[in-house]
Image (cartoon, rainbow, N blue to C red):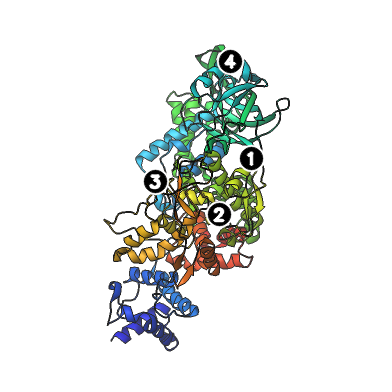
C-alpha cells in the first residue's frame, strides 16, 4: 500500500501518468536512499513521513518544507550520503512543478500608489516640490517592499489624508504675492560678532583667523548663519566661502544643511564638500535649493580623525574657516508661477486678483492674490478636462471626466470663487480611484505598460514620450519597449529606482535607525554614514550603467569610495570626500561585494554589537532567498556580552541545544559567524571591542579594550566548511544560482507590485536565463523582468 501511495505521489508530482515507468525508479530510489530512513515507517523524524505523505495541494505546506530542505541542502543530514546534484535538481523540479500547478498565481494586483510614488507623481504632474509624503501614513511592507498590493490598504483615514495632501499640493501651485526682486544677502562672518560670541560661549572651539570664523568642534551643533536667511519663500542660490585651517595631511569636509532655525532632524542635507583653498582664495561651495522664509544654512564640520582621540598638546588642531556666506534670490520670478500656468493655462480671461491684505515686516501694503476668471465656467471646464487625462495617465472618455467637471461647476453655481471651484475639481481628481490606483484596467494595453514601466524605473507617472508611444500602439513591441527601458534608465529620474530598490532590498532606509556607541566606536560620525550610502548606491549604479554581472554583488574587485570610507577600510591614497569614484580593491583585502560594504553591515547590527542571528537571517532572506521562520514562542533572544567575557559563539551553542532551535540555527548561524569579521560600523576586526575585560587598544587614546578573538569559521549545508569570511564568500561563488534567483525575485516583486509565489518559479528562472545570455548583467536582468510574462499579466 505504501509503495502504491508513493507511485501515486510520483505521478502527481511529475504531472504525467504515462511517464510512470521512467520516473518511478528515479524518485523512489532517491527517497529510499536519502529520506525513508528518517522519514518512513521505521522512524518519523520531525513528525514527517514521506512514504504516506499525501500529494499536493492537500499537504502543500509539508511539501514546501521538503522542497526548502532539499534546495538549501539541509537534507539529507551531513552524516548521511549526499545525493548527486543532478538527482537533487531533478527531484526538486518534480516537487516544484507539482506545487506550482497547485498554487494559484495571482495576477498583477490592483494597488494604490505608495506615498513615495504619490509625492513623485503629484510633483511631476503639477510641477511643484511641496513635501507631501510626510502627510500620508507609512506604507506596509510585503516580501521586503512597500509597493506590493497586499501591504497597501485603503481606509477612511487614508482618504482624509489624501484630501489634505491634494489641498496642500494645490496651494503649492499658486504664488500668492509677487516675488521680491532678486537680491543677495551676504554675511562676512567676522562682522557678526554677536553671533560668533554666542557660539564661543556655548561650545568653545572657535577662533578668528584671517578675517574668518574657524570652527574646530566636529558634528552638531552647527555653525548657523542666521543673517543670510531669505525673508521670503523661493528658490535661492547659496554660496559659502571656506578654507582649511592647519589641515595637516587630512582633507577636511563640511556638511551643509538647509532648514528651520530650530528643530533637529528637520534640516535637509545639501551635500558634503571638501574644504580646500587659502585665506586669500577660499573655496566657494555653491548649491541651489528652495528655502522657506527664515530657513537658514547650517554648516557642520567633520574633522576626522581629530575627534576620535585625545589630541597631544603639540599636535596642530585642524579646523574649518568660514569667510562668508550668501543667499541669492528668489530665482523663481514668475508671477503667476510656472506651475499655475501649467495647470490653469494662459488665457486672457484669467488674471491674478488682489484679495486679503497681510502684514509683512519688510513690505508694506501687501495683499494676497487669487486666481480669477472673466469666463469662469468655460475656463473651469477646460482646466478639468485637460488635467484629467494627464492625471489618469491615459486618454479618457468624456463620461469619465463629466463628474469632475460637474462638481467644479456646481461649486461655481453655489457661489464659490473660480479658484475654489477649480480646487474642488482638481482635488477630486487627485483623490479618485483613476488617479490613486494602478493596474485598474482588465486588459493590459500600451498605456498600462507605460505606467508599469515608469513606476518601476522612475516611481512616477509616464512622461510625454512614453504616452506618445502608447498612443501609437507601439510600446508593446519588443524593440520599442527595449529602447524605452534604455531611455528611462539613462534619465536622472532613474536615481529613484537606485535609491528605492537598494533602500529596501539591502535595507539602506534603516541606516539611521541605530546610533553606534560613542565609547565603543568613536570613529563613527554622520560623514561616515553618508559615505556608506554613497558606496552602495554608487556600486549599484555602476553595475546598472555598465550592465556588469550581478556576480559582483557577491564578490567584486572594485568598489565606489571617497576618502572617508577608504580610510575606514584601510585603503590608502584616496583623497577627497565629496567625489565617489570607482576604485580597484587590493588583491589581498577582504572587501568586495555588498556583504563587505559598511552600509549593509551597519543596518544588520544594532549600533553596539553584532548578532550572527540577525546577520544570518538577513543573508538567508536577501542573498540566498531562504525565508526564516520566527523563533518558537518563549525562546529569548541571544544578547551579545559587550563586557567581553563570553563569546557569542559560546552563547549560541548553549542556545542551540534546544531541539526546537537547533535546525534553524544550523542554517542561520554560519553566514552570521562569517560576518562577525565586521563590527557594527563595517570595520574589519579580528577581536571584539569591550568596555569591560580585555587588552588596551593600540595607541591608547580610546576608551574601549580589545576582548575575545572573532571566530568567523563555520559549516554550510552539505558539509561545506569555511574558515573565515573569504572562505564563506567563496562558497557562495561556488553555487551562485540561489543568489541569481533571489535577485530576480526581488526585481519581479518590485517591478510588478505583487507577491511572487511558488507558482512563479518558472518566471523567475526565465529572468535568470534571459540575463545569463548577457553574462547576467544587471541591466540585462531588468530588461528580462520587463519582457517577462509576469510584467505583462492582466
Q: Residue furthest top?
A: 364
Answer with mark 1 or mark 3, whichever residue precedes in sequence.
1
Q: Which residue was labeled with disc 3?
A: 692
Answer with mark 4 or mark 1, whichever residue precedes in sequence.
4
Residue 781 percent across, percent down from the top left: 58, 61
Answer with mark 3 or mark 2, whichever residue precedes in sequence.
2
Mark toward the viewer: 3 or 2: 3
C-alpha span from label 3 to label 2? 60 Å
Residue 429 percent across, percent down from the top left: 47, 38
Q: Which residue was labeled with disc 1?
A: 578
Mark toward the viewer: 2 or 4: 4
C-alpha span from label 4 to label 1? 31 Å
Q: How many residues crowd mark 3 within 10 Å: few (<14), some (14–19), many (20+)?
A: some
Which residue is depicted at the point 42% across and 61% down?
A: 106
Residue 344 percent across, percent down from the top left: 57, 31
Tag shown at residue 676 = none
* Element type where label 2 sits in the image: helix
Say if residue 345 shows up in the picture.
no
Q: Which residue was labeled with disc 4?
A: 193
Answer with mark 2 or mark 1, whichever residue precedes in sequence.
2
Amino acid at each position: 500500500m505504501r509503495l502504491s501511495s508513493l507511485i501515486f505521489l510520483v505521478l502527481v508530482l511529475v504531472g504525467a501518468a504515462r511517464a510512470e515507468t521512467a520516473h518511478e525508479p528515479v524518485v523512489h530510489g532517491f527517497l529510499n536512499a536519502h529520506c525513508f530512513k528518517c522519514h518512513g515507517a521505521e522512524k518519523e523524524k520531525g513528525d514527517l513521513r514521506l512514504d504516506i505523505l499525501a500529494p499536493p495541494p492537500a499537504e502543500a505546506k509539508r511539501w514546501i518544507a521538503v522542497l526548502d530542505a532539499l534546495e538549501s541542502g539541509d537534507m539529507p543530514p551531513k552524516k548521511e550520503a549526499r545525493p548527486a546534484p543532478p538527482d537533487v535538481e531533478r527531484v526538486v523540479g518534480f516537487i516544484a512543478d507539482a506545487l506550482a500547478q497547485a498554487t494559484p498565481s495571482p495576477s498583477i494586483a490592483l494597488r494604490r500608489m505608495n506615498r513615495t510614488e504619490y509625492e513623485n507623481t503629484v510633483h511631476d504632474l503639477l510641477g511643484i516640490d511641496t513635501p507631501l509624503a510626510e502627510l500620508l501614513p507609512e506604507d506596509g511592507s510585503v516580501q521586503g517592499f512597500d509597493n506590493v498590493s497586499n501591504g497597501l490598504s485603503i481606509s477612511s483615514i487614508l482618504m482624509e489624508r489624501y484630501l489634505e495632501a491634494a489641498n496642500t499640493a494645490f496651494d503649492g501651485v499658486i504664488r500668492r504675492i509677487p516675488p521680491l526682486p532678486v537680491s543677495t544677502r551676504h554675511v562676512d562672518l567676522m562682522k557678526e560678532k554677536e553671533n560668533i560670541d554666542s557660539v564661543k560661549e556655548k561650545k568653545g572651539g572657535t577662533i578668528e583667523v584671517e578675517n574668518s570664523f574657524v570652527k574646530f568642534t566636529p558634528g552638531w551643533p552647527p555653525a548657523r548663519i542666521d543673517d543670510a536667511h531669505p525673508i521670503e519663500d523661493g528658490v535661492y542660490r547659496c554660496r559659502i566661502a571656506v578654507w582649511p585651517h592647519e589641515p595637516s595631511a587630512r582633507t577636511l569636509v563640511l556638511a551643509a544643511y538647509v532648514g528651520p532655525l530650530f528643530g533637529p532632524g528637520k534640516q535637509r542635507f545639501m551635500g558634503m564638500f571638501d574644504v580646500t583653498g587659502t585665506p586669500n582664495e577660499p573655496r566657494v561651495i555653491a548649491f541651489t535649493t528652495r528655502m522657506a522664509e527664515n530657513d537658514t544654512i547650517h554648516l557642520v564640520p567633520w574633522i576626522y580623525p581629530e575627534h576620535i582621540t585625545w589630541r597631544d598638546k603639540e599636535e596642530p588642531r585642524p579646523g574649518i574657516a568660514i569667510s562668508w556666506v550668501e543667499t541669492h534670490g528668489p530665482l523663481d520670478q514668475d508671477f503667476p508661477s510656472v506651475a499655475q500656468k501649467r495647470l490653469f493655462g494662459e488665457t486672457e480671461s484669467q488674471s491674478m486678483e488682489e484679495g486679503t491684505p497681510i502684514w509683512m515686516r519688510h513690505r508694506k501694503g501687501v495683499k494676497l492674490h487669487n486666481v480669477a476668471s472673466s469666463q469662469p465656467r468655460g475656463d473651469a471646464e477646460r482646466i478639468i478636462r485637460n488635467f484629467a487625462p494627464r492625471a489618469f495617465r491615459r486618454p479618457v472618455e468624456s463620461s469619465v471626466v463629466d463628474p469632475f467637471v460637474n462638481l467644479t461647476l456646481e461649486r461655481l453655481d453655489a457661489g464659490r470663487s473660480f479658484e475654489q471651484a477649480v480646487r474642488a475639481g482638481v482635488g477630486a481628481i487627485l483623490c479618485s480611484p483613476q488617479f490613486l490606483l494602478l493596474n485598474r484596467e482588465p486588459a493590459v494595453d500600451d498605456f498600462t505598460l507605460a505606467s508599469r514601466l515608469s513606476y518601476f524605473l522612475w516611481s512616477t507617472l509616464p512622461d510625454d514620450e512614453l504616452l506618445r508611444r502608447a498612443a501609437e500602439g507601439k510600446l508593446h513591441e519588443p524593440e520599442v519597449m527595449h529602447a524605452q527601458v534604455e531611455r528611462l534608465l539613462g534619465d536622472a529620474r532613474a536615481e529613484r529606482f537606485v535609491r528605492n530598490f537598494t533602500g529596501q532590498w539591502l535595507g539602506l532606509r534603516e541606516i539611521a535607525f541605530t546610533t553606534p556607541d560613542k565609547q565603543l566606536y568613536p570613529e563613527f560620525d554622520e560623514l561616515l554614514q553618508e559615505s556608506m550610502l554613497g558606496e552602495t548606491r554608487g556600486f549599484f549604479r555602476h553595475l546598472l550603467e555598465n550592465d556588469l554581472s550581478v556576480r559582483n554583488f557577491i564578490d567584486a574587485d572594485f568598489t565606489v569610495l571617497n576618502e572617508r570610507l577608504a580610510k575606514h577600510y584601510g585603503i590608502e591614497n584616496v583623497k577627497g570626500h565629496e567625489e565617489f569614484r570607482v576604485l580597484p580593491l587590493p588583491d589581498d583585502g577582504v572587501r568586495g561585494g555588498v556583504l563587505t560594504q559598511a552600509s549593509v553591515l551597519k543596518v544588520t547590527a544594532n549600533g553596539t554589537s553584532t548578532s550572527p542571528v540577525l546577520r544570518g537571517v538577513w543573508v538567508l532572506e536577501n542573498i540566498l532567498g531562504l525565508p526564516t521562520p520566527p523563533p518558537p514562542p518563549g525562546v529569548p533572544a541571544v544578547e551579545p556580552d559587550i563586557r567581553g567575557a563570553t563569546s557569542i559563539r559560546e552563547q549560541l551553542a548553549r542556545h542551540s541545544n534546544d531541539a526546537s532551535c537547533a535546525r534553524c540555527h544550523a542554517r542561520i548561524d554560519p553566514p552570521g559567524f562569517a560576518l562577525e569579521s565586521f563590527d557594527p560600523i563595517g570595520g574589519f576586526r579580528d577581536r571584539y571591542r569591550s568596555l569591560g575585560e580585555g587588552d588596551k587598544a593600540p595607541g591608547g587614546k580610546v576608551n574601549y579594550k580589545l576582548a575575545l578573538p572573532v571566530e568567523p569559521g563555520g559549516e554550510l549545508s552539505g558539509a561545506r566548511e569555511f574558515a573565515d569570511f573569504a572562505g564563506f564568500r567563496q562558497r557562495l561563488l561556488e553555487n551562485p544560482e540561489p543568489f541569481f534567483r533571489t535577485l530576480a525575485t526581488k526585481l519581479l516583486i518590485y517591478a510588478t507590485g505583487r507577491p511572487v509565489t511558488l507558482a512563479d518559479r518558472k518566471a523567475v528562472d526565465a529572468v535568470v536565463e534571459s540575463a545569463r545570455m548577457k553574462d547576467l548583467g544587471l541591466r540585462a536582468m531588468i530588461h528580462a523582468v520587463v519582457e517577462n510574462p509576469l510584467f505583462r499579466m492582466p
